[in-house]
Amino acid sequence: MADMAKLSISDKELEYSVLKGSVGPDVIDIRKLYAQTGAFTYDPGFTSTASCESALTYIDGDAGILLHRGYPIDQLAEKSSFMEVSYLLLNGELPGKAAFEKFTTTITRHTMLHEQMATFFRGFRRDAHPMAIMCGAVGALSAFYHDSTDITDPIQRMIASHRLIAKMPTIAAMAYQYSVGRPFLYPQNSLSYTGNFLRMTFGNPAEPYEINPIVEKAMDKIFILHADHEQNASTSTVRLAGSSGANPFACIAAGIACLWGPAHGGANEAALEMLREIGTPERIPEYIARAKNKDDPFRLMGFGHRVYKNFDPRAKVMKATADAVLKELGVTDPIFDVARQLEQIALSDPYFVEKKLYPNVDFYSGVILSAIGFPTTMFTVLFALARTVGWVAQWNEMISDPEQKIGRPRQLYTGPTQRDYVAVDKR
């Protein structure tokens, strides 16, 4: 017999089924709560509410575990590639050789943008934030690709999914090139997904672009580590938008808009800005003291995580990647010295250890991206590029779910009760 949860409200005694996933906390099924009691639950931020059933990603924040379709994130980052992880998230299993070649070929052949999109880009101000361009350009894809917006057709859904994954690097690279006044570069089919992105971003038509394999590998790992992260704010936004029947391009644009928030996708940008504010290693003790002072509004960015109460499993991979990139590029900047020393203090200082304020993925990714040459305005764009795979997989899962309904959160109303209108001359 299934476990039951008992609820007493007014003079009613009710029972609700307890659902069990393959792993993770039990979930109390309260779908009939309002019909049976006339009451809602109150859960700001939905932090205790399971909004859907999913087989994509599992997180155990206390244990520092992140699994994609059951595979630990550190194994995927070390042994796999972003394209292979993309296939895994979309299809549920790692691909065989033939299936993988077919998938990568399909993605490669979808990387070109409709030629009129270049005109669309030129409508933005030259100093527009790349994320603003990203929101507009991705939303506009539905105006250029009418043949893949019918969400009731599984074939069109898959074409749209492939297009979004393939075209996002091209859009991101164009947003960067446009911001610095350089010409757009077409994709080159002989390159890898990540190598192609680096060339389109930093290359120019006047000379060949040589891809640094260590940088290429680092970027690929960054993409893997950001591919999906369960039902976070932007993923929930994609699902909520999709629940209304909106086309996939509009749904992903909604996710990008949500990701833009500094509490979500802007965290690595904020971490790097903090390192720049500290400036030199000599000033670290001053900022450590400020971080410990409850009356000081300063907070160390890039440490701790809302979900992970242990070491962020992605951060372990990212730390090794950061060391390799900084060594390869030989960049000299005081902020990298600040990052190294701040990291060591946070890992050994009793205050940080006790509160489990470990360096997280945002701390290291900001350092890596800056060393490669990306401006901070591009950091969240790169996050969106990688997370598109997760968003697309989550959207497909939601559309295929027979239990799916249009999202409709409830509220605890605290405004005025009913009152009569009074004419303006009598107020």
Image (cartoon, rainbow, N blue to C red):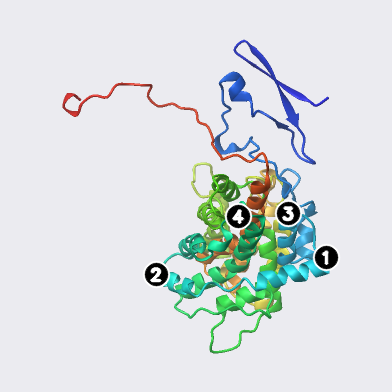
Image point (64%, 35%), residue name: 48
Q: Which mark is residue 96?
A: 1
Find out whether the residues at labels 4 and 3 contact each other: C-beta distance under 8 Å.
no
- For disc 2, the neighbor class at 10 Å (few under 14, some 14 to 19, many from 20) is few
Task: Kindly identify the amino acid type of the residue bearing the numbered disc 4.
Answer: Gly
Q: Residue at x 53, y 66 (%)?
A: 378
> Who is closer to the viewer here, 356 or 202?
202
Q: In the structure shown, which secondary structural element does the residue marked by tag 4 occupy?
A: loop
Residue 120 in sight from this viewpoint: yes
Q: Residues within 10 Å of mark 4 (few under 14, many from 20)?
A: many
Q: Are marks 2 and 3 in contact (CB under 8 Å)?
A: no
CA separation in Å, label 4 and label 3: 14 Å
Look at mark 2 in the image and give the residue it sits on. Answer: 123
Distance Cα–Cα, label 1 vs label 2: 43 Å
Pointer 4 or 3: first along the chain: 4
Give, as a three-letter code, the residue at label 2: Gly
Counting residues from the start of the chain, the first of labels 4 and 2 encountered is 2
The amino acid sitting under disc 3 is Pro
Q: Which quadrant: the N terminus?
A: top right
Callout 1 secondary element: loop
Say if mark 4 contacts mark 1, CB within 8 Å: no
Would you name the residue on which mark 3 appears?
Answer: 313
- Pointer 4 residue: 302
